[in-house]
């Protein structure tokens, strides 16, 4: 299986663990990731809050690059990136005028549609049964709360992915690798996203509620498929504790990390040592055979 | 020799301001065969009509053209005037110089020229008109009512009391509909079953009413005054003639955990069951999908006679010598001939299982309105006590959410369901009466309480019973511990609000009953995008449909409460009485006629007729041998649409009143 | 206080929003479901449904100067659940764009706008976002406020290999810079 690959800015920096685990998981699954040459930032929340044309032009440039490289499918592990790429694609398809403006500003033809896959789309495309068949270390006994955040499932008519109120695709992936998804109620509640630096206290308030709901419903970890979700839930968990005088210690895993681990990768290979909240113990306690 | 009279109406300023009527009248006078041509301010007035009658008599007119408004306004008026003067009404035509001329043009000269042309066209047509006589069809003086809820019951009783036979068909095992499930009704808080069951018994005992329960409409043929309806009586496995309704069978049935439809899923019933104690008729039916014996037969792929599993109900039945239970009963078909049909199929509620933000129906303590009625009902699963379905505890805080699914473009139903504001106030009030210390909250967008005593009822809930209303919708409901977190808004104070509830009641949208679309197709009745059946005219003909002889009553047409349903049912019944009061029905003679000399029997007309009006007629020689089969248009069914006329390849069909000759002469006049 | 309602202002704002973003504010019937589900409502000065209401009443300056539009996290919960299918999230986006362009950003939320601007400034330079660069530029813009915020996280990030002090620029960095400049210029016209 071969797909175009758009890592997104954070996978090179603050989400390097995600980047490592994606590469490892792809390697173990036999998926060839063809990185878009000289891809640029997608604009994330900054572009669409400041200027509409810019918010389409930046993803537009990346779509054009992908097309030029002959890629008709692009995998974007970051939910914000995949959301922006899809949104730009959808808007340009609906408005030839907009497409013309984008082509003018970028100086590149955007061409035919490129289909965008988020992390869970990729796993689905690979096949859950096929994934299960390759698992050498099922994560039995691991109880994780699957957290989707906002941009994977909304706006529903644009991303057309899973169910916006009660999605199940991450749960299916978790089940395929032998773990147990937990039923909980904050799957699609916002973590505060891009306000993480300018309004950290909003983020800590929201993150705390997510952590509490996961814990109350029996989760021992939260599983995510987006680097900003991870950063807010993992790195900011310490701030939650100090601000509220509580002691949350919920490790936050990327679904790609868990998949790679289930396929035999070591914690270091997937970047588990790069988390802020200790994440290696739980995996170690699952034992070599995966039981725990 | 034709002698045509032309009467040009000014219609006050409506025509007169834009069309030079005296000029039109003058020019019309110059048309060949026009012997009388005048203009007048208001032709439809008494003096105007007198002018027509007098002119006919004085000038011996053989045809009349009134140049005025649309025939849809006054054609009957002028035709009656002509008839009064002894001229066949179909020799009187109208030229529409108002809607088609003065109302859509401004240039006086051009409009006047056009008006003259329009008059000329109709004069040429009238010259070709033949006298036509109304068609008479016999009327079967029986009525069919489909649906045994309060609307169907009311319609059936009214028609039956009026002296006509009624066949009432109900698809569930008992009549009563949703009203039987209600605890109390607003605004009087009458016990619903107390006011309903006497009517139900009346239906069962009425000599003029034949009741078919557990039955559905299979096929409908015929036309107004002459319907033939095939009814499927589903196999109940119980011989009602023998059964005494003792209930011994229901006591012993081992399949006890089937969710009860009557209790809206909050209680259970057995496989052989009577839906509720006051059911009419009080005879059980066997639900074959859940009966142990029938399921065993289905699993083994053999007829039920070949299995001996269970059979406890049969054993328990005390009837001698032949038991009332008979597993071999099959669906039976009955054909009823009726003259009129009333559709009263009622409603169902929008499924809360479709609402993601409120839990997709997964949370047992998030219930809908009918479920709350069952909790509040003395005959319900909790004996009338408001208790949480999850743990049976009495809820201290109940949140009622209005507009769930209604007025909601995103969920596909843009209409208001009309009854929810009232029944929610009622629910909150009932809860507070039963749980004095409890807290009742209602999330609403607007309060629609337009009936008699309705607004006062809502104010009573607020001012006397401590029901608190919060103006805003609820975005999400999710469980936290034993509670349900309700995230709503109070737009009046501009705040987001959160309430931790013990029980949440959703006022889900009212939708037409399932399957009503296929029933409507069988009846030839139109329905809208929500499957509500369409009335003939939204203002002036609310109980009739565009299909002659088929009437509407109750929620099948639009969401409505009990008083409105009853009123409408009586309205429909009165229309039925009108229909059934004549031995014969008169129909307009604008029907297609087949020229049997040139018809080749290709039956393309039969294929295109939307009303099934084309029949096949055999032409035999004197020895009885078949020469050919021809098309024949039944004048009792034909609606005069003209499709067959256009389709016929041998030009053998013509439309009386709009013959080819008439129409071509109109065109040539231009 | 009494709001001055001007039919002209209502019409003009209504037309402006319809033209720039195909938004028909009259679709909103003020049910409040957006407010009910907004995760940030507690930190906003105007509830989300109030913002729409003020747009309906032509109160352009009030909405462009509100803290709400910048506190909005663009989580899309509001428009996903709106029964009228009114894209309130898109309205918020457009109000941000207008507010920024006209220099009307609310003082209480200026940090957010500064953050987004810093993001774009850094991206202009390197073609991709350098998080170190972003933090540096942002802190500079906010100086002396927030200087010490998150500074304790820096060593943690570094030891975890999550920070690159020297940002890596892409080959097409100047192309990206040009795109950003052009878009920002065009929107001012």
Image (cartoon, helix red, strand yellow):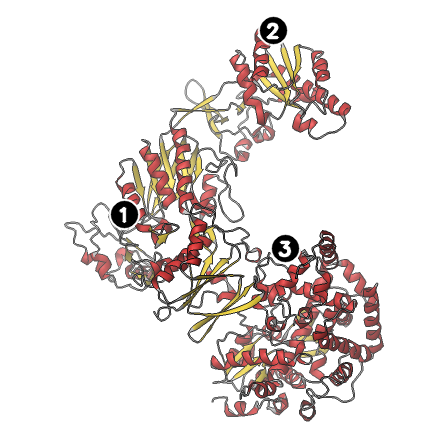
Label 1, on which residue? B281
Label 2, on which residue? B59
Label 3, on which residue? C27
Q: Chain of mark 3?
A: C
Please, is residue B487 above or below residue A145 in the view? above
Q: Around disc 2, counting alpha carbons within 10 Å, would you say few (fewer than 14), some (14 to 19), or many (20 or more)?
A: few
> Residue A146 at what x, y percent from top left?
54, 77
Q: Around disc 1, counting alpha carbons within 10 Å, would you say few (fewer than 14), some (14 to 19), or many (20 or more)?
A: some
B426 or B621: nearer the viewer: B426
Describe residue B168's horizontal placement relative to residue B469 as left or right: left
SS type, badge 2: helix
Q: Identify the residue at image location x=76%, y=71%.
A: A58
C157 or A124: nearer the viewer: C157
Please indicate, yes or no, whether residue A156 appears anywhere in the rendered image.
Answer: no
SS type, badge 1: loop
Describe residue C187's horizontal placement relative to residue B95 as left or right: right
Of all residues, the one furthest to the left in this rendering is B321
Q: Identify the residue at image location x=37%, y=57%.
A: B373
Do the numbered discs 1 and 2 sit on residues whose CB atoms are within 8 Å?
no
Query: How many angstroms separate mark 3 from mark 1 (CA)?
Result: 50 Å
> Residue B591 at what x, y percent from top left?
53, 25
Residues marked 1 and 2, same chain = yes
Q: Quadrant of the C terminus of chain B?
A: top right
Front of the two marks 2 and 3:
3
SS type, badge 3: helix
Q: Quadrant of the N terminus of chain B?
A: top right
Q: Chain of mark 1?
A: B
């Amino acid at each position: 299986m071969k797909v175009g690959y758009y890592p997104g800015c954070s996978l090179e920096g603050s989400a390097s663990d995600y980047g490592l685990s994606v590469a490892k998981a792809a390697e173990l699954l036999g998926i060839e990731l063809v990185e878009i040459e000289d891809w640029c930032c997608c604009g994330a929340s900054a572009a669409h809050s400041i200027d509409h044309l810019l918010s389409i032009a930046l993803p537009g440039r990346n779509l054009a690059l992908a097309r030029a490289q002959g890629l008709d499918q692009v995998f974007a592990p970051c939910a914000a990136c995949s959301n922006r790429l899809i949104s730009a694609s959808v808007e340009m398809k609906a408005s030839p005028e907009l497409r013309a403006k984008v082509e003018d500003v970028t100086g590149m033809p955007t061409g035919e549609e490129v289909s965008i896959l988020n992390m869970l789309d990729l796993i689905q495309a690979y096949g859950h049964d096929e994934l299960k068949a390759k698992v050498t270390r099922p994560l039995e006994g691991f109880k994780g709360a699957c957290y989707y955040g906002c941009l994977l499932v909304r706006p529903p008519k644009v991303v057309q992915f899973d169910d916006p109120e009660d999605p199940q695709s991450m749960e299916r992936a978790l089940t395929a690798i032998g773990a147990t998804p937990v039923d909980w109620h904050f799957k699609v509640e916002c973590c505060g996203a891009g306000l993480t630096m300018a309004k950290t206290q909003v983020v800590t308030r929201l993150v705390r509620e997510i952590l509490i709901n996961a814990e109350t419903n029996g989760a021992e970890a939260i599983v995510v498929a987006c680097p900003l979700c991870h950063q807010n839930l993992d790195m900011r968990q310490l701030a939650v504790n100090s601000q509220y005088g509580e002691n949350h210690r919920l490790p936050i895993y990327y679904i790609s990390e868990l998949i790679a681990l289930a396929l035999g990768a070591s914690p270091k290979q997937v970047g588990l040592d790069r988390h802020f909240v200790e994440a290696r113990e739980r995996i170690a306690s699952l034992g070599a055979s995966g039981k725990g | 020799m034709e002698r045509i009279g032309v009467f040009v109406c000014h219609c006050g300023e409506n025509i007169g301001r834009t069309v030079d009527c005296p000029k039109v009248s003058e020019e019309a006078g110059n048309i060949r065969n026009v012997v009388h041509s005048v203009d007048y301010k208001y032709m439809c007035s008494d003096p105007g009509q007198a002018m027509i009658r007098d002119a006919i008599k004085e000038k011996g007119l053989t045809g009349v053209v009134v140049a005025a408004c649309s025939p849809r306004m006054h054609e009957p008026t002028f035709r009656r005037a002509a008839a009064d003067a002894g001229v066949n009404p179909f020799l009187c035509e109208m030229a529409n110089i108002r809607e088609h001329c003065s109302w859509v043009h401004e240039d006086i000269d051009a409009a006047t020229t056009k008006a003259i042309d329009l008059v000329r066209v109709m004069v040429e047509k009238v010259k070709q008109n033949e006298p036509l006589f109304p068609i008479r069809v016999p009327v079967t003086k029986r009525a069919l009512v489909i649906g045994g809820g309060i609307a169907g019951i009311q319609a059936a009783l009214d028609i039956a009391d009026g002296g006509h036979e009624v066949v009432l068909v109900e698809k569930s095992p008992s009549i009563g509909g949703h009203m039987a499930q209600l605890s109390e009704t607003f605004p009087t808080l009458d016990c619903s079953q107390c006011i309903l069951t006497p009517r139900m018994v009346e239906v069962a005992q009425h000599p003029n009413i034949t009741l078919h329960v557990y039955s559905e409409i299979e096929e409908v043929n015929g036309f107004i005054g002459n319907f033939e309806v095939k009814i499927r009586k589903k196999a109940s496995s119980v011989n009602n003639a023998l059964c005494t309704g003792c209930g011994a069978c229901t006591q012993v049935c081992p399949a006890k955990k089937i969710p009860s439809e009557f209790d809206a899923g909050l209680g259970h019933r057995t496989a052989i069951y009577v839906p509720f104690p006051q059911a009419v008729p009080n005879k059980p039916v066997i639900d074959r999908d859940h009966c142990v014996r029938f399921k065993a037969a289905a699993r083994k792929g053999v007829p039920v006679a070949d299995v001996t599993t269970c059979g406890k109900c049969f054993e328990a039945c005390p009837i001698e010598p032949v038991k009332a239970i008979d597993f071999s009963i099959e669906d039976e078909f009955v054909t009823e001939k009726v003259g009129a049909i009333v559709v009263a199929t009622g409603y169902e509620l929008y499924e809360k299982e479709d609402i993601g933000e409120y839990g997709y129906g997964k949370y047992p303590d998030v219930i809908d309105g009918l479920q709350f009625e069952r909790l509040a009902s003395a005959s319900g699963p909790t004996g009338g006590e408001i208790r949480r379905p999850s743990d049976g505890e009495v809820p201290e805080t109940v949140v009622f959410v209005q507009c769930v699914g209604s007025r909601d473009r995103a969920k596909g139903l843009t209409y208001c369901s009309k009854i929810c504001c009232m029944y929610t106030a009622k629910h909150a009030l009932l809860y507070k009466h039963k749980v004095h210390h409890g807290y009742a909250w209602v999330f609403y967008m607007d309060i629609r309480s337009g009936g008699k005593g309705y607004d006062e009822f809502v104010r009573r809930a607020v001012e006397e019973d401590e029901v608190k209303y919060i103006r805003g919708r609820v975005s999400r409901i999710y469980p936290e511990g034993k509670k349900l977190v309700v995230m709503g808004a109070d737009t009046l104070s501009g705040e987001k609000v959160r309430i931790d509830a013990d029980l949440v009641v959703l006022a889900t949208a009212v939708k037409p009953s399932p399957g009503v679309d296929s029933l409507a197709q069988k009846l030839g009745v139109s329905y809208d995008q929500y499957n509500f059946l369409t009335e003939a005219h939204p203002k002036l003909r609310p109980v009739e449909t565009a299909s002659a002889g088929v009437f509407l009553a109750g929620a099948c047409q639009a969401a409505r409460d009990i008083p409105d349903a009853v009123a409408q049912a009586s309205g429909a019944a009165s229309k039925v009485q009108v229909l059934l009061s004549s031995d014969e029905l008169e129909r307009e003679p604008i029907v297609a006629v087949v020229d049997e000399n040139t018809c080749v029997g290709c039956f393309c007309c039969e294929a295109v007729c939307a009303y099934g009006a084309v029949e096949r007629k055999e032409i035999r020689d004197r020895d009885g041998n078949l020469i050919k089969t021809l098309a024949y248009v039944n004048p009792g069914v034909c609606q005069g649409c003209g499709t067959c006329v256009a389709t016929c390849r041998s030009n053998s069909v013509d439309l009386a009143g709009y013959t080819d000759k008439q129409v071509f002469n109109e065109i040539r006049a231009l | 206080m009494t709001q001055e309602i001007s039919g002209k202002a209502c019409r003009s704002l209504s037309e402006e929003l319809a033209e720039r973003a195909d938004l028909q504010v009259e679709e909103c019937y003020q049910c409040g479901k957006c407010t009910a589900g907004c995760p940030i409502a507690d930190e906003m000065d105007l509830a989300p449904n109030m913002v729409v209401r003020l747009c309906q009443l032509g109160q352009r300056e009030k909405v462009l100067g509100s803290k709400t539009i910048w506190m909005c996290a663009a989580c899309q919960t509001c428009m996903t659940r709106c029964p009228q299918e009114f894209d309130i999230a898109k309205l918020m986006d457009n109000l941000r764009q207008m507010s920024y362009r006209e220099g009307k950003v609310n003082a209480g939320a200026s940090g957010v706008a500064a953050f987004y601007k810093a993001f774009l400034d850094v991206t202009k330079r390197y073609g991709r976002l350098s998080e170190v660069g972003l933090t540096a530029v942002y802190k500079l813009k906010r100086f002396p406020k927030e200087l010490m915020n998150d500074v304790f996280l820096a060593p943690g990030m570094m030891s975890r290999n999550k920070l690159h002090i020297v940002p890596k620029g892409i080959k097409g960095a100047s192309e990206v810079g040009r795109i950003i400049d052009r878009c920002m210029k065009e929107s001012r016209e």
